């Protein structure tokens, strides 16, 4: 299959925090990849803005180094680096003062799309938004892009939403959850709503339960100080896992349009029941063959922050009544592997006697590392010897089926930035969605605090705490083995 690249219109993209970690690791290499693919027009410009003393030449060197370090193989093959670097400018700016703002105003072109990426801590969102307007830099067509963490609870999320809403319309605000930019995550929607096959079965009559697993093999590493104030619930469940749950559980939107999709996601979040304490497992990794303990990495020998969460979520609506959604995510687990498994009910009656009892259809959407879909089906075991049954996966690994097209797929950030330029908010979280997600998450975290909950330890490099196994065993179910 030939991949189709549709160039976007010319733009000026300002990256506040343009020298920071996210800009160097993801945003700039991603933009370079879009440039190499022909999607970013030659006249587009990227303006790094930060406190560091740089001129544009120094910034171009920094970006070239970042691309060499984080760009991967495709980038090493692209000969366009000098041309891309020419598209870069730099402005030294003080987010809380006056320095740099007049220069930025002079630099921005009025006749192209303008976007402002706040790749900075949420404490600066309000200051930046306010200055973009008071210096008359942004227009009613400008877009602002903000990163997670979007608040640390409902109160702070509301404050952030209010500080942005004071300056920009909701249609101008792009809240990034990079999971929504992942190829397979969007495929969830294509699979559900682009095929007739699944949707009639997509309900409590045919589905037994759903498992959403996001396992990481890395620990918190150098991010210990940030992470320790957050924990897996705030860092992963409130946003990434919640978004996956929404896409799996939402009603079909009437069209693939930003508000139609986000309205349906919001209904799912609002229908979530509170989680009971016995349906929650919190874990923290201890030292193991694969690495040091969480406490050592976080630099606090007494911290009770969780690096693992498993829970049973329930959606109180007609479609999902009685269907548990088991969610789990953790760091320093035995492998990096993420998937969503839709486990269908057992046959109501097997004409094959005991032979047919075992099989359960499972649709597994493998998010990473090997993106693809498998559908477990029951077939006749080949060969003579009567009707013996086997349960096998129909395997569609995207790299095999789609070849280069799957390999060249843009990474989540680059796709999302291009959507900002196109003005398409479908894959971005709306303010009310974020608030609803916090409204569900807050009581869980408050409950842990009230009960002085101590996380269960699990060995670094293991599958997580034993209590997470018990969460499903109690319901006579078990987690899938999701090693890649
Ligand atoms: C980030 C979290 O949002 O997502 C990190 O802050 C986590 O803690 C990361 O490691 C996981 O993203 P991915 O794309 O590697 O699955």
Image (cartoon, grey):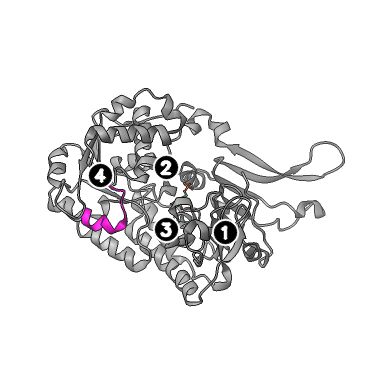
Q: Secondary structure at mark 2?
A: helix
**Does the beta carbon of the residue at mark 3 sit less than 8 Å from ligand 1?**
no
> What residue would you read off at disc 3?
225
Q: Say which label, 3 or 1, has the lower sequence index.
A: 3
* Closer mark to the observer between disc 4 and disc 1: 4
Which numbered dot is residue 412? 2
State the separation of the CA atoms marked 4 and 1.
Answer: 37 Å
* Closer mark to the observer between disc 2 and disc 3: 3
- Tell me if 123 is positioned left or right of 167 in this view: right
Going by the picture, which residue comes out furthest to the right? 385
Q: Report how many numbered discs are placed on residues in the image.
A: 4
State the separation of the CA atoms marked 1 and 2.
Answer: 28 Å
State the separation of the CA atoms marked 3 and 1.
Answer: 16 Å
Q: Is residue 10 visible?
A: no
Is residue 271 placed above or below 138 in the rendered structure? below
**Does the beta carbon of the residue at mark 1 sit less than 8 Å from ligand 1?**
no
- Tell me if 74 is positioned left or right of 80 in this view: right
Is residue 271 placed above or below 86 in the rendered structure? below
Q: Residues within 10 Å of mark 2 (few under 14, many from 20)?
A: many
**Does the beta carbon of the residue at mark 2 sit less than 8 Å from ligand 1?**
yes
Look at 33% across and 68% down and name the residue there.
155
State the separation of the CA atoms marked 3 and 4.
Answer: 22 Å
Look at 38% across and 63% down and name the residue there.
152
State the separation of the CA atoms marked 2 and 3.
Answer: 25 Å
Q: Which residues are magenta?
A: 116-128
Q: Residue 7 location, x and y as percent? A: 32, 31
Q: Secondary structure at mark 1?
A: strand
Q: Say which label, 2 or 4, has the lower sequence index.
A: 4
> What residue would you read off at disc 1?
285
Q: Is residue 200 magenta?
A: no
Which numbered dot is residue 332? none
Which numbered dot is residue 52? 4
């Amino acid at each position: 299959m030939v991949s189709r690249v549709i160039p976007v219109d010319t733009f000026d993209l300002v990256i506040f925090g343009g020298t920071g970690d996210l800009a160097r690791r993801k945003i700039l290499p991603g933009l370079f990849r879009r440039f190499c693919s022909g999607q970013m027009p030659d006249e587009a410009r990227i303006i790094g803005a930060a406190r560091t003393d740089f001129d544009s030449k120094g910034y171009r060197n920094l970006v070239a180094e970042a691309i060499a370090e984080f760009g991967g193989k495709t980038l090493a093959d692209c000969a366009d680096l000098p041309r891309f670097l020419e598209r870069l400018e730099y402005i030294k700016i003080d987010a809380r003062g006056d320095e740099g703002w007049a220069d930025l105003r002079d630099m921005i072109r009025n006749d192209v799309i303008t976007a402002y990426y706040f790749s900075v801590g949420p404490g600066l969102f309000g200051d930046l938004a306010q200055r973009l307007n008071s210096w008359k830099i942004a227009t009613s067509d400008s877009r602002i892009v903000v990163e997670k963490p979007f608040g640390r609870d409902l109160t702070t999320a509301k404050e952030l939403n209010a500080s942005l809403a004071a300056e920009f319309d909701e249609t101008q605000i792009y809240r990034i959850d990079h999971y929504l930019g992942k190829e397979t995550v969007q495929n969830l929607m294509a699979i559900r709503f682009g095929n007739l096959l699944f949707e009639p079965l997509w309900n409590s009559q045919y589905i037994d339960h759903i498992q959403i697993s996001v396992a990481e093999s890395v620990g918190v590493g150098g991010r210990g100080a940030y992470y320790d104030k957050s924990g897996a619930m705030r860092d992963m469940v409130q946003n990434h896992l919640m978004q996956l749950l929404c896409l799996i559980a939402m009603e079909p939107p009437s069209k693939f349009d930003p508000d139609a999709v986000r309205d349906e996601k919001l209904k799912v979040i609002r229908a979530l029941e509170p989680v009971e304490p016995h349906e929650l497992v919190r874990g923290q990794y201890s030292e193991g063959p694969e690495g040091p303990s969480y406490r050592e990495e976080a630099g606090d020998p007494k911290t009770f922050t969780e690096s693992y969460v498993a829970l049973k979520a329930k959606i109180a609506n007609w479609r999902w009544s009685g269907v548990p959604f088991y969610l789990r995510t953790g760091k320093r687990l035995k492998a990096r592997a993420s998937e969503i498994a839709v486990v269908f009910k057992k046959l109501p009656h097997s004409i094959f006697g005991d032979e047919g009892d075992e099989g359960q259809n499972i649709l597994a959407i493998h998010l990473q590392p090997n993106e693809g879909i498998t559908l477990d089906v029951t077939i006749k075991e080949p060969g003579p010897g009567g009707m013996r049954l086997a349960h096998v996966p129909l395997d569609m690994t995207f790299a095999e089926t789609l070849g280069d097209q799957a390999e060249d797929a843009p990474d989540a950030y680059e796709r999302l930035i291009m959507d900002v330029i196109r003005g398409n908010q479908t894959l971005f979280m709306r303010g009310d969605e974020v608030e609803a997600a916090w409204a569900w998450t807050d009581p869980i975290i408050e409950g842990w605090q009230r009960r002085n909950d101590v996380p269960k330890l699990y060995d670094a490099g293991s599958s997580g705490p034993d209590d997470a196994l018990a969460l499903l065993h109690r319901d006579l179910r078990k987690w899938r083995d999701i090693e890649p």
